[in-house]
Image: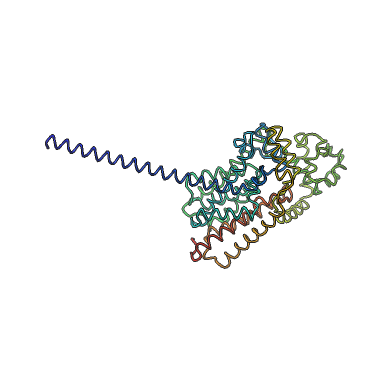
Amino acid sequence: MSSANRLSSAHQLKMTLTGGKTALLAKSRGSRGVQLAKTASMSVFLLTASLMLSWVALFNNAPLVFSDTVSYATAAFQREIPGLFSVFYSIFILPLHQGVTLWPVVFAQGAMLAHLLYVTTRCVSGGAIRRTEFLLIVAGLCVFSSLPWITGQILPDVFSPVLLLGMFVLAFCNDALRRGEVLYIGALTTAAIATHFSHVPIALGLILLCIGLKPIIAPSPIRTRQWAALLLIPFVVAVCSMVAVNWLSSREIGLARNSNVFLLAKLIDEGPALSYLTRACPSAGYALCAHLEELKDRSHDELKWDENSPLKKVGTFDELEPEARRIVRATLCAYPFEILQRAMFDVGRQLLRFQAGDGLSQRFAKMVAEHLGAIFGTEIEKSFIESRQGQCRLPIAEARQLHIVGLVFGVGFCLWSVMARRQAVPTKLVALYIFVFAGIVWNAVVTGTLSGPYDRYLARVIWLACFVGLVGFCYVSRVPNQDSAR
């Protein structure tokens, strides 16, 4: 081959390689551009959903607050470990508020729930429900459910539905998730378990529910060991973290430093502990024996929080804890059937109490304003006092009527779709129906037994009935003749 031909061939090869490299670079840039566009689209989508779910707080002109908000908002900021609460919610929200404003917490909670609801919807519908339709579902939840009243409040109650949905997605939707989504939802579920003591037994019950449903619903490609790890790792990590924090603060193994004081107050209120003390005093040598008459006709909230509570006359909760532990154990041994009977009664009452707005009172708004104002500044104090909650002008009664409508629709449509349109409903969606309603009942069992019936304990998850009803309605309306994806 001549020198000229060799030069020509080399030039052609160089041009080919250069053209190929240019094409690869263009393709790479195009791929990055598409990815950036998708990320931007998802960000706008989540921002829109977050703002929708924050409408109650925005309408209130301040985040919604309960009496416990004080402890949750300040514990990590002041480097304190509460004896009756988990500190982890306080730790998680600290980077968001930084002692300046609680508004980022509200918007982050809205975005967190919106994303988890979207992932769940995408999973059970096989992607049939698009983003625009999902935003309509969110709009329905904003009007006909307690969800925006939960996301707009500074309490770990927002993590109760996260726990329920996170467990469901990890157990039955992992085949439809990217690796990053699995890791994120696993971390989110771990956080959910750690943020509230009631979430530990709730999570344990949900794991057992997953095991029961696994033969029917769990993705077949996933191995049993891997499937179990997805559920057990968040639980083990969360519980070990809670025990470790309690050990550092009290040198005792348990979830909370003052958990026995909490249980003692409930058992005195309900009668068994008071009966035991009446029988055991004064020979038992309890310090509470000196205040036996004062314990009568007191609610457990009064025993825990009133300044003149006989429990506080004995000493601090830390000082009372060893005696409370002995009394609680002795009461459980002496009156097991009475305690079980009362627990069953409380569970029944809890199932009937689910109204939104529990504790969103003017008195609590002013109390929170006073305490947070001393730490965060006068602007925070002013915002809570001047809020609609602080002025007793929240439309709680009107909202509750709409929530009843949403609950009736959700339950009614789930029953109708399963009974009349079963072939049009995917198996995973039916599984979500079962999981949500079983989770709501189990939530009532745990909270009614351990703490007693309060509306806020069921309001934090009851809106899921409306959610699954709306998802089912959108799916059946969109693909009315599609067979179940088995």
The reply to whether residue 45 is visible in this rendering is yes
Rendering colour mode: rainbow
Q: Position of residue 178 (x, y in %)?
A: 47, 47
Q: Is residue 44 left or right of residue 398?
A: left
Residue furthest toward the left?
2
Q: Position of residue 177 (x, y in %)?
A: 49, 49
Residue furthest toward the bottom?
420
Instruction: Please name whichever residue, 104 or 113, is drawn nearer the observer in this view of the structure.
Output: 104
Q: Is residue 297 left or right of residue 461?
A: right
Image quarter of residue 89: top right
Can you say whether 53 is above or below 125 in the image?
Answer: above
Residue found at x 56% / y 57%: 471
Residue found at x 14% / y 37%: 5
Q: Is residue 343 left or right of residue 486?
A: right
Q: If the image is split into quadrants, where does the N terminus sit?
A: top left
Q: Position of residue 133 (x, y in %)?
A: 53, 56
Instruction: Please name whichever residue, 235 or 407, is drawn nearer the observer in this view of the structure.
Output: 407
Count numbered badges in the picture: 0
Q: Is residue 270 left or right of residue 18?
A: right
The reply to whether residue 199 is visible in this rendering is no
Instruction: Please name whichever residue, 186 or 3, is drawn nearer the observer in this view of the structure.
Output: 3
Q: Position of residue 395 (x, y in %)?
A: 70, 51
